[in-house]
Image (cartoon, rainbow, N blue to C red):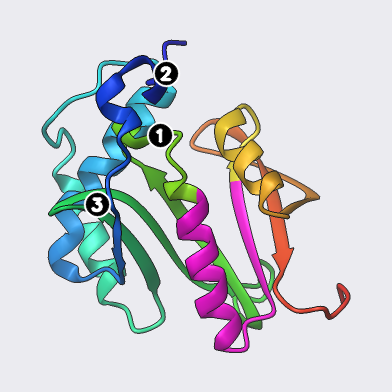
């Protein structure tokens, strides 16, 4: 697979300053573009410069409008280059919200900015924010073959739970991280 590599481009060695802020409904189109570009790059496909799935913009906007959704976006100037988004964890059997546990549902970085620490910074910022709001743990799912994301989560202290699930036709594994010193219950 031919992944973008910032060290191949001298311009990318000059790391821009990134600004971080929570997402807003008006960010939905930019979020969709980052999602599409990151997925295409991971799959080794053509990386479009325009949105190819505008039908998902409304879904992103709806999710951002929920009071329970949290997000953190990274910008280089006025261009969105990374995002993290989540919501309270739901018990799969009962459908009830699990107090003190959150689901990271998206962590995406534009492939032109891969390898520059944005994903790790997004995780650090959201973990600090969630911990200050008494969240005890974060869980997430990622593709078993997504080595880039798995390596990031492992570097940041996330542990495999042993749970597996098939999502969108691909095997996914679950990671979790405890934000407090409290032992797993």
Residue occupying image coordinates x 64% and y 47%: 153
Judging by the rendered image, the residue that carries numbered circle 2 is 3
Q: Earlier in the sequence, mark 3 or mark 2?
A: 2
Residue occupying image coordinates x 18% and y 69%: 25
Judging by the rendered image, the residue that carries numbered circle 3 is 31
Q: Earlier in the sequence, mark 1 or mark 3?
A: 3
120 or 15: nearer the eye? 15
Residue 10 vs 81, above or below: the answer is above
**Magenta span:** 120-141
Give the spatial CA distance, label 2 vs label 1.
Answer: 9 Å
Q: Earlier in the sequence, mark 2 or mark 1?
A: 2
Quarter occupied by residue 68: bottom left
Judging by the rendered image, the residue that carries numbered circle 1 is 114
> In the drawing, does residue 91 fall left or right of residue 67?
right
Q: Which element carries disc 1, helix, strand or loop?
A: loop
Q: Residue 51 at x, y = what percent? A: 14, 37
> In the drawing, does residue 58 fall left or right of residue 64?
left
Camera-side mark, 3 or 2: 2
Give the spatial CA distance, label 1 vs label 3.
Answer: 16 Å
Give the spatial CA distance, label 3 vs label 2.
Answer: 20 Å
Question: Is-magenta flag for residue 128?
Answer: yes
Quarter occupied by residue 45: top left
CB of mark 1 within 8 Å of CB of mark 3?
no
Q: Residue 142 at x, y = what percent? A: 58, 42
Q: Specify the label residue 54 is tagged with.
A: none
Q: Residue 94 at x, y = what percent? A: 66, 76
């Amino acid at each position: 697979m031919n992944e973008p590599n910032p060290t191949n481009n001298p311009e990318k060695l000059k790391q821009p300053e990134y600004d971080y802020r929570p997402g807003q409904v008006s960010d939905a189109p930019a979020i969709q573009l980052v999602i599409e570009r990151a997925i295409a790059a991971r799959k080794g496909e053509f990386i479009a410069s325009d949105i190819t799935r505008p039908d998902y913009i409304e879904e992103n906007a709806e999710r951002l409008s929920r009071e329970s959704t949290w997000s953190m976006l990274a910008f280089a100037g006025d261009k969105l280059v990374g995002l993290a988004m989540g919501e309270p964890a739901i018990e799969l059997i009962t459908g009830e919200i699990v107090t003190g546990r959150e689901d990271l549902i998206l962590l995406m970085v534009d492939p032109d900015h891969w390898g520059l620490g944005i994903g790790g910074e997004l995780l650090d910022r959201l973990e600090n924010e969630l911990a200050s709001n008494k969240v005890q743990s974060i869980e997430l799912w990622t593709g078993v073959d997504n080595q880039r994301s798995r390596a990031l989560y492992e570097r940041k202290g996330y542990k495999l739970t042993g749970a597996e699930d098939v999502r969108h036709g691909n095997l996914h594994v679950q990671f979790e991280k405890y934000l407090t010193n409290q032992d797993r219950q």
